[in-house]
Image (tube, helix red, strand yellow):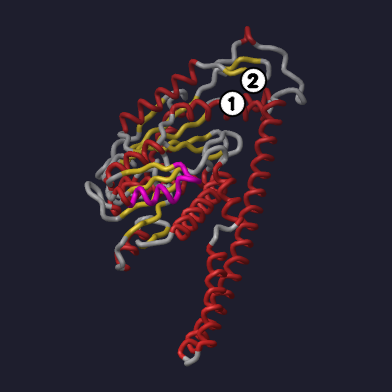
Amino acid sequence: MEGLEKSERAPLPKPAEAGLSASEGKDEVAERLRSAFQAAIAQLDESNRLIRERDARQEEFLAAASVELKDLASLLARPGGRSREEALRRILRISDDLERMARPSRLGELSLVRLSTGRRPRVLLADDEPDARELLTEALAGDYEILTASDGREAVERAHKERPDLVLLDLNMPRLDGFGVLDEFRADPRTSDIPVILVTARSDDGGKVRALDQGAVDYLQKPFSERELRARVDRTLRLSHTHRSLRELAQTDPLTGLANLRAFRARLDDEVKRARRYRTALTCVMADLDELKPINDELGHAAGDRAIAHVASVIRAELRETDFGARCGGDEFVVLLPHTAGDEGRVFAERLCARLKKGEIAIGGRRLRLGASFGVACRPPDAGEASPESLVHAADGALYAAKRNGRGRVVVAAPGDG
């Protein structure tokens, strides 16, 4: 086995000793993931229960208030001072009840604390009117870290750089309007998951529906109250945080920390749609650890897990922010490289291959030099309606060609195979 030098061989450790830390570490990670997942589910259930109870109380109160206001209207229509005084007294009581109902609930305060996790949520305010930005800042600055943008282009640039937790977006702005901002947000993996609340003075349903279709999660129509603004912001942040936490737990491979196969399939569809829409290149790299079976046979599967985790760490270190790496299962990995041509993907794979050959890892009292084979396939900008699976199949075919040709090398699929 390559990299397993005779001069460095040591007596095989006892089964109870071989890879003990790796096995314990894997179990600990899995247990922590299970605990975190259960805690997140419990928190979500409790939050939903409290929200349902609050909404039910509010609906009951509003229904009762509606009936009473109609009764008051008839009282005010009657002649005589006493009926008017009674009506005014009851109106003031209803007003006080409405004000109490509109105050931020304890549920909102608790959710904001959980969301911050060491820092206040970051909110980007994108509006070309200075007065509007100032009013929004005054309403939110006490609980949120505020970023501002005076036009759509600046909003996109700040979102890429600052990674806000939420964006309040005006529709009518210079350089790039709100629709253009939403379009660019969803086209870029760095911003595609940022929730956006549309803030607009437009009353037509067409604009709102279009914004929601392009990915906005909610909208506020100007003018609006500070209470409504804060309630919408808090609700959106709370739901976004819960959704993100659950998704990460469900889509992460516990051994490597990379995405799992389910997450890869979803991301593949999204990336192919982006590449097709914007006519950009998309490259897929598949990798397979060489000679894993001898490691498992001689040192145990816990040692094999350490080897797999090491390869994953090398891959993760080479990924850009927009790249996506996943473990397909066993000792196979796949990487998606958006906006990347086939030659650039080959350079990426060759860099990984070289790093693995040069590095060593201590497993079971031995120092091993691991290797891997790589297959590269590119979906060119003019690929048309080629299916997402065809790109993966082409990379997989190139990977097996690398295996057949001697392992520890990179093979690129022929143009058009992806």
| 71 displayed left or right of 367 | left
| 58 displayed left or right of 125 | right
Number of marks present in the image shown? 2
Which residue shows up at 36% across the image and 37% down it?
283
Q: Position of residue 222 (x, y in %)?
A: 35, 61
Whether label 1 touches label 2, CB < 8 Å: yes
Which residue shows up at 60% across the image and 56% down it?
107
Residue at the far top in the pictured view: 7
> Would residue 393 be visible to someone looking at this image?
no
Please name the amino acid that badge 2 sits on: Ile
| 12 displayed left or right of 55 | right
Residues packed near mark 2 inside 10 Å, few (<14), some (14 to 19) or many (20 plus): some
User: Is residue 93 depicted above or below 350 in this figure?
Assistant: below
User: Is residue 17 depicted above or below 190 in this figure?
Assistant: above
Magenta stretch prevailing secondary structure = helix
| Front-lying residue, 295 or 240 | 240
Residue picked out by circle 1: 307
The C terminus - image quarter: top left
Q: Position of residue 79 (x, y in %)?
A: 47, 92
Q: Is residue 142 magenta?
A: yes
User: Is residue 324 depicted above or below 371 in this figure?
Assistant: below
Q: Position of residue 311 (x, y in %)?
A: 53, 27
Tell me the element at label 1. helix
Please name the amino acid that badge 1 sits on: Ala
- Magenta stretch: give its range: 132-145
Q: Is residue 227 magenta?
A: no
The N terminus - image quarter: top right
Tell me the element at label 2. strand
| Front-lying residue, 211 or 357 | 211
Residue picked out by circle 2: 363
